[in-house]
Image: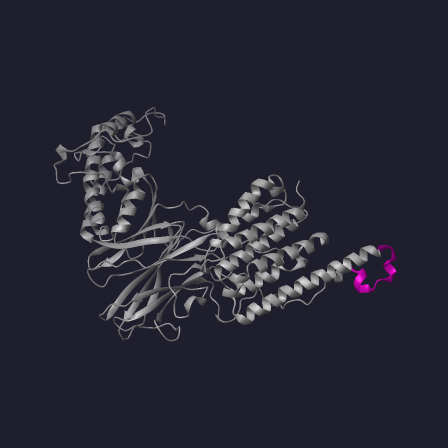
């Protein structure tokens, strides 16, 4: 097993390498954190059994090891370095100052023999970050930090010399003063001021806060904006405090807090004021904080205060040229899944009303609770359905990757969407009618998922054709609207070719719940009579194996999927044949999330 002292040196070298690799990054950024994680993964391989034995899995967000005698000093040092590097990437002066104080605090370590080496290693890490620190901190703060580091190093050498003297005179302990004989005073130094602790209470769950700011002048919320004016749309997430300028009290410190690596992408979608498509703004990114404001990891715009604001995202918008209400939607997504939508009604032109905001979609109750976000699968596509006004239905397409979210907002006439919904209802109703009585539209009967068979394969195939003929025109309308955003449209078609995960987020003002499962994106002659259209041979063979009379047992012996799913369809390109793989609900994993006050929450214990 590798000695802890050697592990401390390895962790220090990993941190210094991460800083060297990201010395020229533009803040805020996650680059230094990514380099640190890469170095940790290499270190985990080289340390093998020592890595989990010292509880270092938590540095890569692994499970915590049961440590009956407390955390190892290597873990304490590693988590302190992790908090410091994350604070650097966020570019928060307060977080950096707090992280440095923890990193250079020898009182955290359990083994007195390791306290000195760990503190010296922390000094090396801080000095390796001097260039980045000079950007994050102003002149006075940077000078004080360098002085603090130098004083800490001088103190460590004093402690080292005194311990050497004590070791040499161990047999003559009576000659030492009370300060030298009692370990309580070993390494004594002036303590930094700590926040008041008795009144500390865990903060409430975070809230999405939005504001409209003028392009120039003081950073104050504007109750209304001038037509055609340029504005900043500000977004922050954090607990509500009576006074934003007052620092929140801190909990008592034991171990450095495990900084979550969960990130939230934020994109703003304003309604277009004319016929021209409105390009989406560059998205921003926030890091989830368990007990405070979410920190900016990728800004969207400079904002009225430049790059100095580490708690708010700023999006540059231009108000419409004519007075009235202007809708701007703020969408928050985790791993590509929409978790929150805040709709802002901006009042353009002076009037009796003021700009206001409301939550129109909420998937999770507490954005800061890791358990609430743990079950979210990464989405290939997120689709938000919202009201468009004037007989229109709005659809927002969101594609996420490491660089953020690319989004486009399109509109369809409500009557086209309503006709699609009605066609799907009729087809589903007839397909699931399995009693011997004549079909009566709207009557209540058992459905196929209640252990009853679908009936004759040809009967089911006819309805699959009807569903495809209803779903294909809607997809053509959506695809045509998306062609006004050529880059996103091309990327969307590329991402939807393999099987993936599609989320439908239905906002409160949406008129209809669109059955995206029945969108059909294979070629099809939708104007042809039903008699000229049929399902492909592979789909028909599959239906024949699975669809039949009700059975006394629940087992089936047919294939799980038609052969055209694993390879090309036998009738690929034939626009008179319907393949089941062309339906979104079969090809992709589709989830429909309704706007509801019963958002997902962490189960109570």
Q: Check residue 180 for magenta coloring.
A: yes
Q: Say which quarter of the image contains residue 145.
A: bottom right
Is residue 260 something that shows in the picture? no
Nearer to me, 560 or 598 = 560
> Residue shown at 57%/60% (left/top)?
99
Considering the image in quadrants, where does the N terminus appear? top right
Is residue 530 something that shows in the picture? yes
Q: Say which quarter of the image contains residue 194.
A: bottom right
Residue lying at the far top in this picture: please name it.
Answer: 557
Q: Say which quarter of the image contains residue 212.
A: bottom left
> Residue shown at 26%/61% (left/top)?
271
For the stretch drawn in magenta, the main secondary structure is helix
Residue 520, percent across and down?
23, 41
Residue 500, percent across and down?
34, 41
**Which contiguous range is marked in magenta?**
170-182
In the rendered picture of this protein, how many numbered marks are placed on residues? 0
Residue 278 position (above or below residue 220):
above
């Amino acid at each position: 097993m590798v000695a802890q002292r050697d592990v401390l040196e390895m962790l220090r070298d990993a941190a210094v390498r991460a800083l060297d690799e990201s010395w020229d990054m533009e803040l805020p950024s996650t680059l230094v954190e990514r380099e640190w994680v890469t170095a940790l993964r290499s270190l985990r391989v080289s340390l093998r059994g020592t890595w989990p034995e010292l509880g270092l899995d938590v540095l890569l967000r692994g499970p915590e090891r049961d440590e009956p005698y407390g955390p190892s000093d290597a873990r304490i040092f590693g988590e302190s370095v992790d908090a410091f590097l994350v604070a650097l990437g966020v570019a928060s002066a307060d977080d950096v100052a707090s992280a440095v104080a923890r990193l250079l605090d020898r009182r955290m370590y359990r083994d007195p023999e390791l306290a000195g080496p760990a503190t010296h290693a922390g000094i090396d890490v801080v000095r390796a970050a001097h260039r980045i620190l000079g950007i994050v901190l102003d002149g006075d703060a940077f000078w004080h930090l360098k002085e603090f580091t130098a004083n800490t190093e001088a103190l460590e050498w004093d402690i080292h010399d005194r311990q050497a003297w004590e070791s040499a005179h161990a047999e003559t302990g009576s000659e030492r003063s009370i300060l030298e004989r009692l370990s309580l005073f070993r390494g004594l130094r002036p303590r930094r001021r700590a926040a008041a602790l008795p009144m500390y209470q865990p903060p409430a769950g975070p809230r999405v806060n939005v504001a409209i700011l003028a392009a120039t002048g003081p950073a104050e919320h504007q109750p209304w904006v001038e037509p055609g004016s340029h504005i900043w749309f500000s977004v922050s997430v954090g607990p509500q405090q009576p006074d934003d300028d007052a620092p929140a009290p801190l909990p008592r410190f034991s171990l450095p807090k495990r900084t979550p690596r969960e990130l939230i992408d934020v994109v703003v979608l304003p309604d277009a004021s004319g016929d021209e498509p409105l390009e989406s703004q560059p998205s921003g990114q926030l890091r989830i904080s368990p007990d405070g404001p979410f920190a900016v990891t990728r800004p969207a715009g400079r904002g009225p205060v430049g790059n100095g604001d580490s708690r708010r995202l700023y999006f540059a918008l231009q108000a419409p040229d004519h007075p009235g209400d202007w809708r701007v939607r703020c969408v928050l997504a985790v791993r590509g899944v929409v978790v929150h939508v805040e709709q802002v009604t901006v009042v353009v032109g002076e009037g009796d009303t003021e700009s206001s905001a409301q939550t129109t979609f909420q998937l999770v109750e507490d954005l800061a609770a890791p358990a609430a976000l743990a079950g979210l699968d990464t989405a290939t596509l997120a689709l938000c359905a919202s009201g468009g006004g004037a007989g229109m239905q709005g659809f927002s397409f969101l594609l996420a990757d490491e660089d953020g979210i690319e989004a486009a907002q399109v509109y369809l006439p409500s009557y086209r969407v309503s006709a699609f919904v009605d066609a799907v209802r009729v087809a589903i109703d007839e397909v699931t009618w399995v009693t011997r009585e004549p079909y009566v539209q709207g009557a209540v009967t058992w459905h196929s998922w209640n252990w009853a068979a679908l009936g004759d394969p040809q009967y089911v195939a006819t309805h699959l054709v009807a569903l495809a003929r209803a779903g294909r025109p809607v997809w053509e309308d959506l695809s045509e609207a998306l062609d006004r955003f050529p880059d996103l449209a091309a990327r969307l078609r590329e991402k939807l070719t393999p099987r993936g995960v599609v989320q439908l987020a239905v906002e409160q003002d949406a008129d209809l719940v669109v059955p995206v499962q029945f969108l059909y994106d294979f070629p099809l002659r939708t104007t042809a009579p039903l008699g000229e259209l049929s399902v492909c041979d592979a789909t028909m063979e599959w239906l024949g194996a699975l669809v039949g009379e009700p059975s006394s047992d629940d087992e089936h012996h047919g294939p799980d999927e038609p052969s055209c799913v694993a390879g090309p369809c036998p009738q690929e390109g034939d626009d008179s044949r319907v393949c089941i793989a062309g339906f979104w609900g079969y090809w992709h994993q589709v989830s429909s999330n309704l706007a509801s006050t019963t958002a997902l929450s962490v189960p109570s214990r």
